[in-house]
Amino acid sequence: MKFVSFLIDGQAKFGIYNNEKITDLTNKIKATKTLKELISKKGIPEAKEYAKNNPASISLEKIKYLPVIPNPGKIICVGLNYSEHVKETGRSVEENPVIFFRVPESQTAHMQPIQRPKVSTHLDYECEMAVILKDAGKNIKEEDALKYIVGYSCYNDSTVRDWQQHTSQFGMGKNFEKTGSFGPYMVLAEDIPDYKKLTIQTRLNGKVMQDAKLSQLLFDIPKLISYISKAIPWKAGDVLVTGTPGGVGFKRKPPIYMKKGDKVEVEISEVGLLSNIIEDE
């Protein structure tokens, strides 16, 4: 089952996507106004039942997508989590995950522009899988970690490379406005029996640039959830962005950066296809 956040007639809503239409869930389940709130109030089972009795009626032509979770409490990202990406950057595999953060304001959505900022022409793509958490928890054991996941989505962790390289910290290059694309929807974890069987790919103007399997993650998802929870309590609606494979643009010869009019797609098998056009600020 697929959950989506969207705008219609200027109002932010959320619902369940099915057969090119949406069942509006806004204020229908436990008076929840957002998908994050539905997750927090453990309303997913009721939402599924509501959708069975209320067929989808909103056509996609009437909506604008929002990031799957437009208002996450935190977006925690992982760097250097595929061996080919570690190799191409000239780094070494670390003993612990490389962690950085995105702010919600840096996000954009499926079919909405990714914005190349005025201050740079070094905008790069990064396909990643996003994990949406459903329960609060600290000091989570690895063997229990998958129980804390409500769903999965696609993420393009687009990066302004020259700003990322201003210092040894990643933050500035990762937080420009409208660069982190998140969507198009959240697929329930219960519908993905084994995330390690999924494949992930980036296409730029139709050409495959990145292609990998989720089984190739150096630090797998349970490890990441557990490791981060030792310092930061997870809360419902938080987002974990799990890292990008090899093939990024800035390490190609010559480097390839996204420019105005380019179409970039991130596709994860069984999860979805996230598509954006690049626009200049």
Image (cartoon, rainbow, N blue to C red):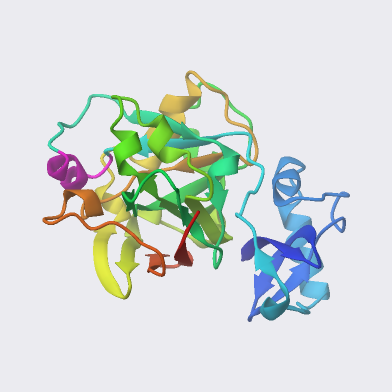
Tell me where residue 67 appears, x and y as whole percent: 60, 54
What is the magenta range?
A: 81-89
What residue occupies the far front of the structure in this picture?
118
Which residue is located at x 14 percent, y 45 percent? 88
Tell me where residue 145 appears, x and y as whole percent: 48, 36
Q: Nearer the viewer, residue 54 or 244?
A: 244
Tell me if 194 is positioned left or right of 91 in this view. Answer: right
Tell me where residue 212 appears, x and y as whole percent: 25, 58
Q: Does the stretch in magenta take in 16?
A: no
Tell me if 10 is positioned left or right of 255 in this view. Answer: right
Tell me if 48 is positioned left or right of 2 in this view. Answer: right
- Residue 57 appears in the rendering: yes
Quadrant location of residue 218?
top left
Tally of numbered tags:
0
Tell me if 41 is positioned left or right of 77 in this view. Answer: right
Which residue is located at x 54 percent, y 59 percent? 183
Q: Nearer the viewer, residue 183 or 181?
A: 181
Which residue is located at x 70 percent, y 62 percent? 6
